Image: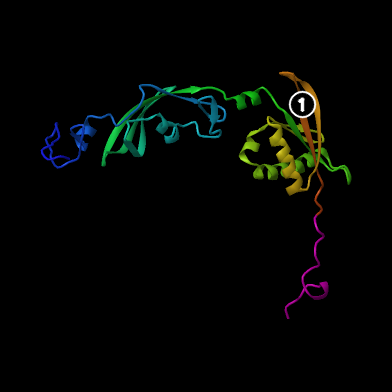
Amino acid sequence: MSEGEFCVVCGATDRPLVDGLCAPCAADRTVLVSAPQRAEVVLCPHCGARQVGSHWERAGASPVLTAEDLNPLLEVAEGVGVRRVRWDETAVTATVHEFVGHARVRYRGIERDVDVPLSVRVVHRTCPECSRKSGRYYTATIQLRGALDGPNEKAAALRARLEEEWTKIVREMRPDWRKAVSWREERPEGWDCFFTDTLAARAVAKLAKQRFGASVKESSSLVGRKNGQDLYRVTFCLRFPRRVSPPPGPPSGRGGEQAVEQ
């Protein structure tokens, strides 16, 4: 700062100036952080996914609005850094939520606390994935079946055993594979699991073969044409052999007899 320069507002001569203003006075006259008069969050009521631009993300998220929803709505002035924001909900109706954000910001070397009122309208709109599932849309089926050889199993016992195998597989599925499972139907010979993504179904079938000993047979059927190309539905038949329990060991004690303390 040149000798004789001073802040045109407060008269300070010992502070750096920009356009004749020291940092505190510039901060007082600048809208550091603001929010639109009415913001909007589009939320799928079925899976909790949020629409961001033309795509959907965060499937499985809570329907409650959080900082992850609110922070991107803030409008931050040039040169301002936001340290942290804490949100308090002050009012709520069926579709509109009122918040106050308590923001800690840094501007030209000084930190300030700024309160930002924000009004958010929640729009419920079914995401494409849930829309397909509700319409029973699918591109692939995984059939859970018992082994072809060996003793016959009663239908109820077979389904119970196959359901246990399926539960183990689901635990090890990647989130995107699990998301592709649309619905499941009971069959006399086992279960049919319907997928909205053929690649995910193929990956699950491979997992069942490698990790759980299932045999896999893949087949496909033509279901129509779209944009000049044939459309196929793919079926993966998984057969799970019945696990044989090892025979019980001999009773404890020498020579197969129970040891008796003398």
Magenta highlight range: 245-262
Residue 199, position in %: x, y?
70, 35
Q: Main secondary structure of the magenta part?
A: loop
Examine the rendered structure and indicate whether residue 128 appears above or below residue 188.
above
Residue 70 placement: quadrant: top left
Q: Nearer the viewer, residue 216 or 91?
A: 216
Examine the rendered structure and indicate whether residue 21 appears above or below residue 172.
above
Magenta segment: does it hold 246? yes
Q: Nearer the viewer, residue 242 or 73?
A: 73
The amino acid pointed to by label 1 is Tyr
For disc 1, the marked residue is 232
The secondary element bearing badge 1 is classed as strand
Examine the rendered structure and indicate whether residue 21 appears above or below residue 122.
below
Residue 136 placement: quadrant: top right
Residue 175 placement: quadrant: top right
Residue 233, position in %: x, y?
76, 27
Which residue is located at x 83 percent, y 75 percent?
255
Magenta segment: does it hold 29? no
Residue 217, position in %: x, y?
82, 38
Q: Is residue 64 left or right of residue 30?
A: right
Which residue is located at x 79 percent, y 68 percent?
251
Q: Is residue 5 left or right of residue 66?
A: left
Which residue is located at x 76 percent, y 44 percent?
161
